[in-house]
Amino acid sequence: MTTDQPSLKPGTEEAAPFVEPPGLAKARELGSAGRTVVEALGPDAFAGATIDPEHGAADIYVTTEQAAEAVRSISPDARAHVVPLSYNELVALRDRITVDREWFSSVGLELRSWGPHVPDNVVRVGAPSFDSTAVRAVNDRYGAHVQLVVDDSVLVPVGGR
């Protein structure tokens, strides 16, 4: 008996093919369109975008109500969220943390990762552990837009967020 199927050796598995979520293309298109519309209003109006491929939607984060209205005009599936910091400001904060790595060591924080987290409009800083003294020091130096993360899952808001 011959088949067109490749034979598998005992104890091996074949990986399932990637199945693209039905709304992925639409969500990507909305995210891109939202960013284009918002950036036309100025470099500090855009705060980021995330896509929802399961629902064919995109969340566009902006810094002004005018930008939010522009996003809403694209489609009902382009969801606008007004946040305080632009993406450029989040990147500047991330870059400041990069420069301050020695300072973090001086307050007992071993940096493992750091970067913008668009939905929360913060820069997340990952460390293996930290104490309340380190949390206060980070809050005093950076304010409310830094979020400490342990083991990529336990979030400790800084600055009363």
Image (cartoon, grey):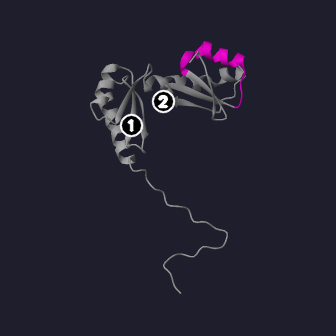
Q: Residue at x 48, y 29 (%)?
A: 119
In this orientation, which residue lies closer to the viewer: 151 or 69?
Answer: 69
**Residue 80 x/y as whole percent:** 37, 28
Which residue is the site of mark 1? 58
* Residue placed furthest toward the bottom: 1
Instruction: State the mark number for residue 66.
Output: none
Q: Main secondary structure of the magenta part?
A: helix
Q: Residue at x 48, y 79 (%)?
A: 4
* Residue placed furthest toward the left: 73
In this orientation, which residue lies closer to the viewer: 38 or 14?
Answer: 14
Q: Amino acid at mark 2?
A: Pro
Task: Place residue 29 in its image quadrant.
Answer: top left
The stretch in magenta equals: 128-145
Please check the rendered image and state whether residue 118 is part of the magenta-colored stretch, yes or no. Answer: no
**Residue 71 x/y as whole percent:** 31, 30
Question: Which callout, 1 or 2, points at the residue further toward the start of the chain?
Answer: 1
* Structural crowding at the residue carrying mark 2, measured as other residues with C-alpha within 10 Å and reported as few (<14), some (14–19) or many (≥20): some
**Can you see residue 40?**
no
Q: Is residue 155 positioned above or below 107 on the image?
A: below
Which residue is the site of mark 2? 119
* Structural crowding at the residue carrying mark 1, measured as other residues with C-alpha within 10 Å and reported as few (<14), some (14–19) or many (≥20): many
Looking at the image, residue 47 sits to the left or right of residue 76; the answer is: right
Q: Are marks 1 and 2 in contact (CB under 8 Å)?
A: no
Task: Give the spatial CA distance, label 1 vs label 2.
Answer: 12 Å
Q: Residue at x 61, y 12 (%)?
A: 140
Q: Amino acid at mark 1?
A: Ala
**Can you see residue 32?**
yes
In this orientation, which residue lies closer to the viewer: 43 or 7?
Answer: 7
